[in-house]
Image: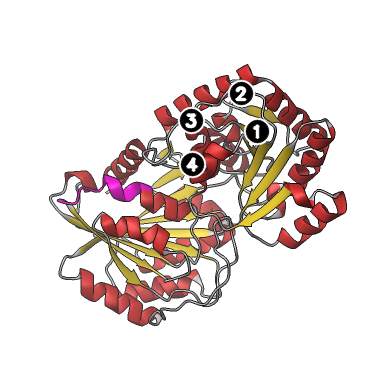
Amino acid sequence: MTQLALFFRTADRKMSMIEQDHESVLFLNNSSVIGGVELLISAIVPYLDRNRYRVFYGLPPFPGCEEHVAPLEEQGVTWVPLNLLAKPASSSTSAPPSSPVTTPAPSLKASLIQIWKKIIPERIDSLIYHHRDTRQTKAKFIRMLSSIGTQPGICHLIAGNYDWMAGADAACRELFPRARRVIHMANPPVFSTPTGLERRMYRDAHAVIFVSEQTRGAWKKKLGSIPMRDTVLPEPIEMGHIPFTEREAIDKHTWSLCTIGRLSPVKALDVAIRSLKEVRASGLDARLTIMGTGPEEEHLRKLTAELGVNEFIDFAGFVSGPEKHFDDIDILLQPSLSEGMPISVLQAMAAGLPVIATDVGGLPELIRHEETGLMIPAPPKVDDLTAAICRLLSDHALRRHISSEASAFVRSRFEAGKAVAELTDLYASIL
């Protein structure tokens, strides 16, 4: 999924966010689902000292957004309803069921003016903009920001579609020539031959962030070099609401498997469904919960019916805060064909929920086979996934060992406060 974020800071500020006496921060988000960027915002806000920061949040009033916004408002965040979508965003992992929005949002321009009226008295110093794919182009929105708002000191772009992201980078260079540009590589390169814009985006960035060493290596291999200023910065995870649960060494009558993610071909959920049938055929009473929605749902439901496992698979759809259900799950399955650094896997590991995953993207940096999880080769095969599931369900000692090791590893390296501090230090270093 494509994402675009612009982190704006006024060019005359030379100190890091932590060093300033007071700063106003605005999060702009055109999402209609709760996904990775929303979790990132929820992780960052607790680390912004209320005595130093005023935080504002522009977000469309989509069904289910209250569960995301309410905790932020309790921490002093001011929410301003937006209308940034030209059409409803595609369903994703956390997309709530379709239902009408009862509170109409103002138009895009009116929303921005409303925000500026609230913030101008406080002075806006940082703007974080997250954009999901819609008919509204990134250039149109960037130009509208430039006509209403401030000249940024930093533009920070995040995307999975690098051709699209390179166009946004070109627009930022044109509109904000004095801004420092930070390029955030969330996934390995997917192009066969990079375009001129993609090469320039990568070569001329003031800083490049990679989510994993694997992603960093893939870009170096593809383009032959690494920018002068680069860093590996994984997704920050707020650990406070994810307690560790020790896995009991008992034989259960029914085992619970789970997948969390967008229902798209890259997640290879058909392999998980076929593996469930084989696991049950081996004599283990296992069930599978599929959390998320997406374009593959109809196909996956048909496959479930064809295999005769309907009664053992639950298409749960939108699940708010899936980590709340980790105590009821025995294994998280991540049989993906491609990944960056999935937040669901990090959260599961922090909670002590054992994970079986493919060796793609940043996953090998999280999962040491038989230590912090079980790893199978990509592309995933039904036999490999079935064998890994059966082994983990049958070996109590291994399950408990993986649970404790995974939790300790993630909690020591991915805690949100540390990640946010590294990010703000990077900003300070390039201003």
Q: Quick one: label 1 or label 4, which is nearer the N terminus?
A: 4
Question: Which residue is more in the foreground, 206 or 322?
Answer: 322
Q: Amino acid at mark 2?
A: Arg
Which of labels 3 and 4 is toward the front? 3
Contact (Cβ within 8 Å) of mark 2 with mark 3: no
Q: Mark 1 falls on what kind of element?
A: strand
Distance of label 1 from label 2 (alpha carbons): 11 Å
Q: Quick one: label 1 or label 2, which is nearer the N terminus?
A: 1
Q: Quick one: label 2 or label 3, which is nearer the N terminus?
A: 3
Distance of label 2 from label 3 (alpha carbons): 12 Å
Distance of label 3 from label 4 (alpha carbons): 31 Å
Distance of label 3 from label 1 (alpha carbons): 18 Å
Residue 139 image point, x, y percent: 47, 71
Which of labels 4 and 2 is toward the front? 2
**Could you tell whether 166 is left or right of 44 in the image?**
right
Q: Amino acid at mark 4?
A: Phe
Q: Amino acid at mark 1?
A: Ile
Is residue 235 within the magenta segment? no
Which of labels 1 and 2 is toward the front? 2
The quadrant holding residue 142 is: bottom left
Position of residue 270 relative to residue 376, above or below, is below
Q: Give residue 399's mark.
A: 2
Distance of label 4 from label 2 (alpha carbons): 31 Å
